[in-house]
Amino acid sequence: MNKKLTALGILAVGAGIGAGVALLYAPRTGKQTRRRLRNTANQALTRLEDMQEEVQAKVTDWADEASEKIASGVASGKESVGRVIRSVTG
C-alpha cells in the first residue's frame, strides 16, 4: 500500500511538472499562462485531496475489519478456554 501511495505521489508530481513545462512553452500571454498554471495546480490539488479521502476511507475500512476479526478471534478463544475448563473440572 505504501509503495502504491509513493508511486501515485511521484506520478502526480511528475504530471504537474510536465503540465507546468508544457504551459510555459505554450504560445500564450503571461497572464493566460499564469491563469492556466493556477487552474492546473488547483485541479491537481483537488485530485490529490480526493485520493487522500479515498485512502483514508480504505484504511478506516481495513482497521474496522481487522478490529472485527480480532474481536471474533478473542471471543472464539474465550469460548475454547471455557470448554477446556469445563471439561477439566467436569
Image (cartoon, helix red, strand yellow):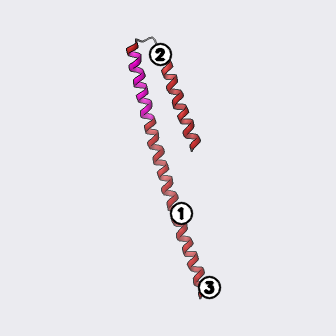
Q: Position of residue 89 (x, y in %)?
A: 59, 87
Q: Residue at x 46, y 41 (%)?
A: 52
Q: Residue at x 59, y 41 (%)?
A: 3
What's under tag 2, amino acid-wise? Answer: Leu
Task: Classify mark 3: helix, strand or loop.
Answer: helix
Query: Is residue 77 magenta-colored?
Result: no
Q: Which residue is mark 3?
A: 88
Q: Nearer the viewer, residue 57 or 13?
A: 13
What's under tag 1, amino acid-wise? Answer: Ile
Most common secondary structure along the magenta stretch: helix
Find the magenta span and give its range.
32-47
Against 51, residue 15 (above or below) is: above
Decide: few, some or many residues near mark 2? Use Cα within 10 Å; few <14, some 14-19, many ≥20: some
Query: Is residue 38 magenta-colored?
Result: yes
Against 87, residue 23 (above or below) is: above
Q: Position of residue 30 (x, y in %)?
A: 40, 13
Q: Position of residue 90 (x, y in %)?
A: 59, 88
Mark 2 → mark 3, Cα distance in angstroms: 81 Å
Against 64, residue 74 (above or below) is: below
Q: Which residue is mark 2?
A: 24
Task: Classify mark 1: helix, strand or loop.
Answer: helix
Say whether residue 86 is left or right of residue 43.
right
Q: Which residue is mark 1?
A: 70
Specify the label residue 39 is tagged with.
none
Q: Total label count?
A: 3
Q: Position of residue 56 (x, y in %)?
A: 46, 46
Point out the tag, 1 or 3, that comes first from the N-terminus: 1
Q: Quadrant of residue 28?
A: top left
Decide: few, some or many residues near mark 3? Use Cα within 10 Å; few <14, some 14-19, many ≥20: few
Task: Classify mark 2: helix, strand or loop.
Answer: helix
Q: Residue at x 53, y 63 (%)?
A: 70
Point out the tag, 2 or 1, that comes first from the N-terminus: 2
